[in-house]
Amino acid sequence: MSMEKRVLFQSKWLPWVLVAPQLAIVLIFFFWPAGQALYQSVLQEDAFGTSRQFVGMENFERLFKDETYLESFWTTAVFSLLVSVICMAVSLLLAVMADRVVKGSGLYKTLLVWPYAVASAVAGVLWLFMFASPFGMVAFALQQIGIPWNHLLVGGHAMTLIVVAAVWNHVPYNFLFFLAGLQSIPKSLIEAAAIDGASPFRRFWSIVFPLLSPTTFFLLVINVIYAFFSTFAIVDATTHGGPGKETAILVYKLYYDGFKALDMGGSAAQSVVLMIIVIALTVIQFRFIEKKVQY
């Protein structure tokens, strides 16, 4: 018979006191702003907040009649898909390589983690310098092989720039989790497969990758949320949503309409739509993709 250990508090108020700081943070920095956004989304107010009027769903109706906003859905979908897939593929490859390094493994892992310490805006500016035509290191190399790089005029080039910056900045986060997942797999399983004659690729695909499925699923959810929210600084520091609106992802358009165009009600409505989209994507991932995860 197994004995389950439970922590018993003599005071019924002590558990609430212990969780009160975290509850306060969640309420103040998550639920309160979300409630404010919901409230503002049904109002029409001037930029200075001196007058406001209840307009119901008018902000949302106007939003979905805006062609540039509808185009930003496609831009965001392409961007988030590229960032998530490339981040996970590159970090998994690096984690597999790092797991095999014997000498200098600590230095190797440290160098791979360093980019995560760089702020998103700084990462954007760093890659902007390297892609700056014609004297940026990457832009110069591309021109030498016959690719006339210009992210200021070509939408595909601008999208490539922000994807590369976002991936470089977020690969270390994925790398850490994949490396931890690889190191938790019993070596006896790999050795048994090797004795049975399985090739390195077969061992990885049949044993290692299925055992990494919980980590992969977790990172998929995190990367989608990262691409939707945390990449604002990269876009703002590099392309400003340009050329035209080619890289105006949803979170950047929300900022632009609210703080540049001073449309408070419309930007609040955009924040509500963005919140609903991310919640829906997360629910879909847990409902359908998680079924293939082997815990």
Image (cartoon, rainbow, N blue to C red):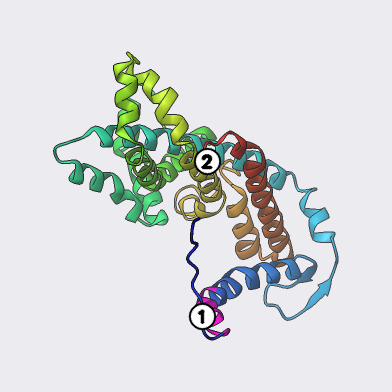
Q: Is residue 179 visible?
A: yes
Q: Which residue is mark 1?
A: 9
Nearer-the-camera pick, 181 or 55: 181
Q: CA distance from mark 1 to mark 2?
A: 36 Å
- Three-letter amino acid code of the residue under disc 1: Phe
- The residue sitting at 68% across, 61% down in the picture is 267
Nearer-the-camera pick, 109 or 185: 185
Q: Is residue 238 above or below residue 84?
A: below
- Residue 167 screen position, x and y as percent: 42, 42
Are the residues tagged 1 and 2 within 8 Å (C-beta)? no
Specify which label sits upstream in the sequence, 1 or 2. Answer: 1
- The residue sitting at 66% across, 53% down in the picture is 274
Magenta residue check for 89: no
- Residue 231 screen position, x and y as percent: 50, 51
SS for callout 1: loop
- The residue sitting at 50% across, 55% down in the picture is 1
Q: Is residue 178 rendered to the left or right of residue 233? A: left
Q: Is residue 40 above or below residue 205?
A: below
